[in-house]
Amino acid sequence: SSFGKASINTYYLPTTFAEYVVVYMDFPTVLSEKFDLDTRFDAMRDAQVKSAKGKVISEVEIQYGSYYGRQFTVETGHLTYTTRTIAVEQRIFILTVTTKGSLSRQSEKLQASNESRITKFLDSFTVTNISKPVLSQVPLPADFGIQITGRRFYSRFFDISLDFPMQWNILNAAENELLTELGKEEVTRTKPKLVDYLKGDTTRILGGVSRHNLETEVNNAVLLIAAERAPYPNFLPIAIANTYVKLFLDPNEKVVKPPSTQVIGGVQFAWLETYDPTSKITQRFYFANRKGIVFEIVLSFMDSSQLEPMLQSLQTLKTDVSAGVK
């Protein structure tokens, strides 16, 4: 899974008229953000559609007390799958009733019979007791302990330092904040489902450099260092890279180098590269898990001559730098 090995528990009962399945799995932390849950529910629905080679005929959001869920029905030519997913604290339950034939096209008597057994099973669901989550989500700290000495960038929180490219423009705090807001505005324009997710303090640009002055020239190359809140502290960096490919690509953006892993300065990163033929901009994204938060480095450029000094900058990355920062 996105945090390593996970146990999935499945209970299955076949009968003459229907098959009943209950599946549940635990995540490390409480799952409370709607965007995160919707992402998982979408993936479950799409997986069932693909596996059954069927189509979605209905889908609604549901509430189980204060807990959020989703119910959808998938039909094939000879089977109907009615699934209800509910997130209770850190546990996701998946209840499925499989009935014979296409439910939406059955005779009135058969349809009523199937709908009755589906409703009876799904509505019988009751949570009696579940274990407590083993971990908690790590919020972004108020202070990452950022210092820039000469060309050297330091973060006390992440315990990481690196040298910015020579003769590039170091971005000030106001420029970092504006770039963060512009990025959020662009994402919410092209991906409306992310609006609520980005309202809080989920992402922060900590520092960066641009090839040209942002106020006086059109910049086409930038190196940014950022932090992003993760759903649980033991996430795998490759999972973050795969999630970017699935959810965050711009409409014209293409993946030219799929997610892979690389160790830089002793830190395990997952990275990928994309290209937008409209803007002619290539971007490389590097993700690492530092203290349960996503440590990100983004390289944006238009030609390889701009990439090379940024790659050289990455090779200066070091950890255990606290003793050298005043």
Image (tube, rainbow, N blue to C red):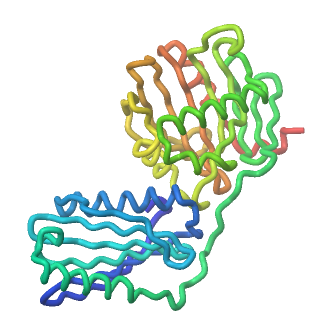
**The C terminus sits in image quarter:** top right
The image position of residue 215, as x and y in percent, is: 71, 13
Within the image, what quadrant is residue 69 found in?
bottom left
Instruction: Find residue 54 and report its horizontal and vertical position in percent.
Output: 18, 60
At 57% across and 59% down in the image, what residue appears?
231
**Farthest residue, direction top:** 216
The residue located at (48%, 40%) in the rendering is: 191
Front residue of 265 and 9: 9
- Image quadrant where one finds the N terminus: bottom left
Q: 256 or 77, which is in the foreground?
A: 77
Dividing the picture into quadrants, the one containing residue 279 is top left
Q: Position of residue 97 (x, y in %)?
A: 26, 79
Counting the numbered discs, the total is 0
Residue 77 image offset from top left, x and y in percent: 9, 65
Q: Residue furthest right?
A: 326
Q: Residue at horizontal 30%, vertical 57%?
A: 46
Residue for point 65% across, 38% down:
226
Q: Is residue 18 above or below residue 293?
A: below
